[in-house]
Each structure stands twice: as C-alpha cells, then as structure tokens.
Amino acid sequence: MELFEAISKRASYRGHYESTPVPRAHLEMILRAGLDAPSGCNKQTTSLIAVDDATLMAQLLDAIKPDADDPHPVVGGTAPAFICVLTRRLVAYRDRSYFMQDYAAAIQNMLLAAVALGYESCWVEGYITDADKLGRKMADILGVPEEYELVCYLPIGVAVDPVRRVSKKPMRERAWFNGFGKE
Ligand SMILES: Cc1cc2nc3c(=O)[nH]c(=O)nc-3n(C[C@H](O)[C@H](O)[C@H](O)COP(=O)(O)O)c2cc1C
C-alpha cells in the first residue's frame, strides 16, 4: 500500500477482530517499523513486546478488564495480537529526555505499518496509564523490569466491523503557508 493511502486509511479501530493469527513475519515488519522511528539524540528509548500467545493474551486482558459496572469492553479485547510499547526515561541532552516523543514516533510508524499490511489497530495509552496503573500490571505479566514503563498497547488484527473515521478540522484551521492563519 502506498504511504499516503496508509496515512489516510489509518483510524482508531475499537471493534471486533477476526481470530485469525497475525503471521510472525507481519508482526516483525510492524516491530521493525517502530524501531526504525527517529529518537531524540538517537537514544532509542522505546522497546517493544509483541504478544501472540493466546494464554498470555488472556492473562493481559484479565489484568486490564474494566470494572463490572463499566459497559465498555476493552479496546482490542478480541485481537489475536498486541504490541506493547515500553519506554525508559533516559536523559538525551542536558536534563532533557525525549522518551515521549520517541515512543510516539515509534507508535505512529507501527500504526501505519499495520494498516499497510491490512490490519487495524488503536493507540491505547490513556486507558492503561491512568491512576489504576494497568500498564504496570501488564508489564509484570510480561516480565518487564521496573525501569521500563509500559505506556501503550496496540491491538493488531483483521477488522470484523466497519472502520469508522472521525472528522478532522479543515486544513485551513490548522495548517498554513508563511505565517499563522495565512491563506
Ligand atoms: C496519546 C494517545 C492516547 C490514546 N489513548 C487511547 C485510549 O486509551 N483508548 C482509546 O480507545 N483510544 C486512545 N487513543 C486514540 C485517540 O482517541 C484517537 O487517536 C483520536 O480519537 C482520533 O481518532 P483517530 O485515531 O481515528 O484519528 C489515544 C491516542 C493518543 C495519541
């Protein structure tokens, strides 16, 4: 798939997934796309864990399932694979760490790679980095050392439901040539 087609096709998918496994070769391509992303001072603060083992997937989903009174299912709860995104807050320059920019770039590369290969996904970060620290629970299941934070997971799989696109503001409200708000 052409790059600009993948960019325009990408959307956060929160529907059901086909149970068909994602081939390892595809997961590796998506991981590689993430690792190929830029990082501040090339510190490469992002690490990744692809999970495609059904028992492990069930353990992760059990750890992050919503409270009994919450009607919303876990995003990607039927996906055959997750990619978990880990970060370390390493100092890159003076007292600055670019860990967040680093993992955001890696995530976006992986979302585009997933779409290019015919899969859907969703950037799930807010849900697992809230006060209940679900990311740490996932990290413990995956044997992640304490100095790494599990900040996001990306479900990966083939969509069953239609992919809905949210509307974006018109370009003229957010991007200009030669000065703020210019035509
Ligand atoms: C930093 C960040 C955190 C996000 N966390 C979640 C999340 O926890 N759950 C979720 O369903 N979507 C999450 N999203 C997806 C956004 O809701 C989504 O990107 C936004 O609504 C725009 O829709 P689009 O991705 O289809 O363009 C997150 C996106 C970003 C960039």
Image (cartoon, rainbow, N blue to C red):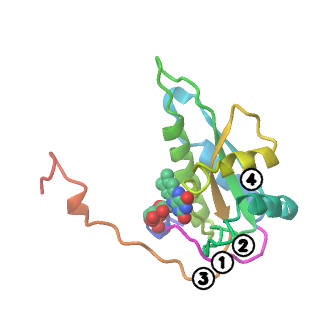
Q: Which residue is mark 2?
A: 78
Mark 1 and mark 3 lie on one chain; the one further toward the N terminus is 1
Whether the residue carrying mark 4 lies under 8 Å from ligand 1 is answered with no
Q: Label 3 is placed on what type of residue?
A: Asp
Q: Which residue is mark 4?
A: 50
Q: Label 2 is placed on what type of residue?
A: Thr
Q: Is residue 148 above or below residue 65?
A: above
- Bounds of the magenta span? 11-21
Q: Secondary structure at mark 1?
A: loop
Q: Which residue is mark 3?
A: 161
Asked whether the viewer can see residue 26, the reply is: no
Q: Are marks 1 and 3 in contact (CB under 8 Å)?
A: yes
Asked whether the viewer can see residue 68, the reply is: yes
Mark 1 and mark 4 lie on one chain; the one further toward the N terminus is 1
Q: Which residue is mark 1?
A: 16
> What residue sits 84% from the left and 60% below the top?
53
> What residue sits 65% from the left and 67% below the top?
74
Picture quarter with the C terminus: bottom left
Mark 1 and mark 2 lie on one chain; the one further toward the N terminus is 1
Q: Is residue 163 above or below residue 146?
A: below
Q: Label 1 is placed on what type of residue?
A: His
- Between circles 1 and 4, the one closer to the viewer is 1
Position in image of residue 4 (x %, y %): 44, 63
The residues bearing labels 3 and 2 have C-alpha atoms spaced at a distance of 12 Å
The residue most toward the bottom is 161
Q: Are marks 1 and 2 in contact (CB under 8 Å)?
A: yes
Position in image of residue 31 (x %, y %): 67, 50
The residue most toward the top is 94
Q: Which mark is residue 30?
A: none
Picture quarter with the N terminus: bottom right
Whether the residue carrying mark 2 lies under 8 Å from ligand 1 is answered with no
